[in-house]
Image (cartoon, helix red, strand yellow):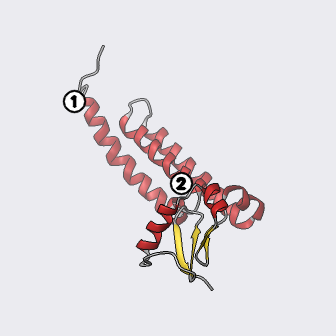
Amino acid sequence: MDSPIFFDTWAGLGRILVTGLLAYPALILMLRISGKRTLSKFNAFDFIVTIALGSMLASVVVTGTVPLAEGLLALAMLIAWQFCITWLSVRSERLQTLIKSNPTLLVHRGVYQERAMREERVTKAEIAAALHSSGKGKISAECSVILETDGTLNVFKAV
């Protein structure tokens, strides 16, 4: 049987409304308790946690197969794991190396670092856009560009 275009039942709409009104504030509360790092853009690990949190929240609110209490427990568990792993990574250089990448120098004193650009899959056009957004018109001998661990391009004056 085909599902209706707009909604199945009024009860289904009501369930989404109630779970959304309860799950979203609960997630906000859990994120506030866990600290700023939970939703940071530090590295791929943090990005994955953010995507997983969004996916879990959507599953709780939209699908009828995940009860609210189970969904909130899953959200809390993911936040707790993220908190534990980041807490440990601050204390263990080995774990930090495992979950965090290092910044990459893409332009050094006006010279493109072609190998680094290929390895990081960054184009000259992307570097030019970063230069423009930082107020630089074009690449010069006084400028360097780093690909940060969160994926942003940082333009600075070379020393």
Residue 150, label in figure: none
Question: Alpha-carbon distance for marks 2 and 1?
Answer: 33 Å
Farthest-out residue, bottom: 159
For numbered disc 1, what is the local secondary structure?
loop
For disc 1, the neighbor class at 10 Å (few under 14, some 14 to 19, many from 20) is few
| Quadrant in which the C terminus appears | bottom right
Residue 112 showing in the rendered view: yes
Q: Which residue does the image show at 43% across and 29% down from the upper left?
A: 65
Q: In this view, does 20 lie above or below 97?
A: above
Q: Where is residue 62 in the image (x, y as percent from the top left)?
A: 36, 36
Vertical relation: 88 (above or below) 76: below
Which is more foreground, mark 2 or mark 1?
2
Which residue occupies 31% across, 35% down? Answer: 15
- Three-letter amino acid code at disc 2? Phe
Which numbered marker is on residue 47?
2
Disc with the residue nearer the chain's start (2 vs 1): 1
Which residue is at the front of the view, 50 or 33?
Answer: 50
Kind of residue indicated by mark 1: Phe
Of residues 146 and 110, the one nearer the viewer is: 110
On the image, the x and y values in percent for residue 84 come to: 65, 57
Residue annotated with mark 1? 6
- Is 14 or 99 nearer to us in this picture? 99
Callout count: 2
Residue 89 sits in quarter: bottom right
Q: What element carries label 2?
A: helix
Horizontal and vertical percent position of residue 120: 61, 57
